Amino acid sequence: MELSRYPWLIELNEDLKQFITDDIIIKVITDDWEHSQYYQLREATFRDEQKILKEDRDEHDFKALGIVAIGQMFGEHDRVIGAVRIFPENKQCWWGGRLCVEPLYRHHHAIGKALINAAVSTAKNLGCQTFLATVQQQNERYFQKLCWDSVRELTVANIPHVLMQAQIKQYPLQHVIMQAYSYRELC
């Protein structure tokens, strides 16, 4: 059962957090189950929770690479708990988008950072020189802390957004990688 579709159950079962795994991997989607859960998480976030989109999928999904955070339980892949997509505009300009994290895992602040790091670093390794994203305005400062510059304000689906550009030369972000390791050591 997808807990993100049942907010009342999340509140009722706050004690479940102690059973949530800290073993998380970030990877490009390779398996059908990952792809299926990737779309389920995006729809739960952008269509059902935030009510931004009536239909989550668009023309960019045909050329996009999906990157996911997968929770592991007892060393086995358990489920997709975070997602982002990247796609090329051309060989040197790439876009990122649809960044989301399962509500039960949002307290792991390193998951979003790790997904952003993986998205920009993957595109950079594929020849990207310019990496852009439209970011909800309330997340602008979060991205700025991850070496992103604000380009201009815009509106998407009647919600304030900011067009942002990653400082691509800063990627991969070593402090994000080190934070993930130090987080694991503290647990």
Image: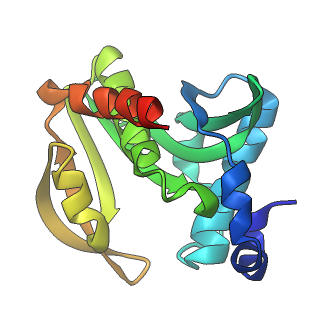
**Residue placed most toward the observer, 126 or 79:** 79
Q: Residue 113 occupies which quadrant of the picture? A: top left
Q: Residue 174 occupies which quadrant of the picture? A: top left
**Residue placed most toward the observer, 139 or 175:** 175
Above or below, 136 relative to 58: below
- Mark yes or no: residue 120 visible: no
**Horizontal side, residue 76 vs residue 20: left or right:** right
Q: Quadrant where the N terminus lies?
A: bottom right
Question: Which residue is drawn at the image coordinates 15% and 42% (left, top)?
Answer: 147
Q: Position of residue 149 (x, y in %)?
A: 11, 51
Question: Which residue is drawn at the image coordinates 26% and 24% (left, top)?
Answer: 172
Q: Position of residue 35 (x, y in %)?
A: 72, 37
- Mark yes or no: residue 84 visible: yes
Question: Which residue is drawn at the image coordinates 55% and 45% (left, top)?
Answer: 83
Question: Which residue is drawn at the image coordinates 24% and 53% (left, top)?
Answer: 143
Determine the residue located farthest toward the right in the rendered image: 1
Q: Position of residue 167 (x, y in %)?
A: 13, 36
**Horizontal side, residue 87 vs residue 75: left or right:** left
Above or below, 151 relative to 155: above
**Residue placed most toward the observer, 51 or 26:** 26
**Horizontal side, residue 14 vs residue 151: left or right:** right
**How many marks overall?**
0
Q: How is the image coloured?
A: rainbow
Q: Position of residue 161 (x, y in %)?
A: 29, 71
**Residue placed most toward the observer, 24 or 83:** 24
Above or below, 172 relative to 84: above
